[in-house]
């Protein structure tokens, strides 16, 4: 369970860093900043997917940027709650993780169906594995009690 907890804490940390970065961009020229990152990562700015993403993100209002940052922090908070419950080996932590991770499975399946990739399949398998493991753990402990 502690391995899953560490995984949740890492996800929370990454979301916090990303959200802080989003908040710092509220009053900047987002288009220029994103184009700089695209070039720094050696992506082709003329690629239609990159171009579409740049165009879409460049038109975000400060309110929309703020909302994206807040949603990121909210998810980070949920990951911290999950990780804490799992780290402390609490039953509620297992249930919170089962519910929240299980809720993402249909979304991940939808994404794989519409835009398949190896990474998406791997994430789906990892999340399903976590849910199955925790459900079996709870069922086994309940039988022993």
Image (tube, rainbow, N blue to C red):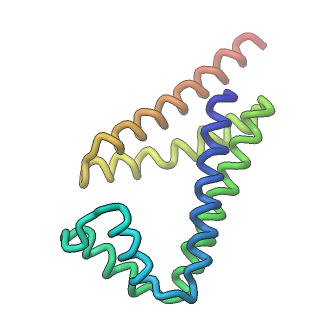
Choose top left, top right, bottom left or bottom right for residue 26.
Answer: bottom right
The quadrant of the rendering that contains the N terminus is top right
Residue 28 locus on image (x, y percent): 53, 87
Name above or below for residue 88 compared with residue 34: above
Choose top left, top right, bottom left or bottom right for residue 67.
Answer: bottom right
Residue 102 locus on image (x, y percent): 52, 42
- Residue shown at the point (19%, 73%) measured from the top left: 46
Residue 141 locus on image (x, y percent): 71, 17
- Residue shown at the point (33%, 69%) measured from the top left: 39
Choose top left, top right, bottom left or bottom right for residue 68.
Answer: bottom right
Horizontal placement of 46 versus 15: left or right? left
Q: Nearer the viewer, residue 89 or 95?
A: 89
Name above or below for residue 92 compared with residue 28: above
- Outermost residue, top side: 144
The quadrant of the rendering that contains the C terminus is top right
- Residue shown at the point (56%, 24%) measured from the top left: 133
Horizontal placement of 88 versus 68: left or right? right
Name above or below for residue 78 compared with residue 132: below
Q: Nearer the viewer, residue 19 or 106?
A: 19
Name above or below for residue 80 compared with residue 26: above
Residue 116 locus on image (x, y percent): 25, 47
Q: How many marks?
A: 0
- Residue shown at the point (26%, 75%) measured from the top left: 52
């Amino acid at each position: 369970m502690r391995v899953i907890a560490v995984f949740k804490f890492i996800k929370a940390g990454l979301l916090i860093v990303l959200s802080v970065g989003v908040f710092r961009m509220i009053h900047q020229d987002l288009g220029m900043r994103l184009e700089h990152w695209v070039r720094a990562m050696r992506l082709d700015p003329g690629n239609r997917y990159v171009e579409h993403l740049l165009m879409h993100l460049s038109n975000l209002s400060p309110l929309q940027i703020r909302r994206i940052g807040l949603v990121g922090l909210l998810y980070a908070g949920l990951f911290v709650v999950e990780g804490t419950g799992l780290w402390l080996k609490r039953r509620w932590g297992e249930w919170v993780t089962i519910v929240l991770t299980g809720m993402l499975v249909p979304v991940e399946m939808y994404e794989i169906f519409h835009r398949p990739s190896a990474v998406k399949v791997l994430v789906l398998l990892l999340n399903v594995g976590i849910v199955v493991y925790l459900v079996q753990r709870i069922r086994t402990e309940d039988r022993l009690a």
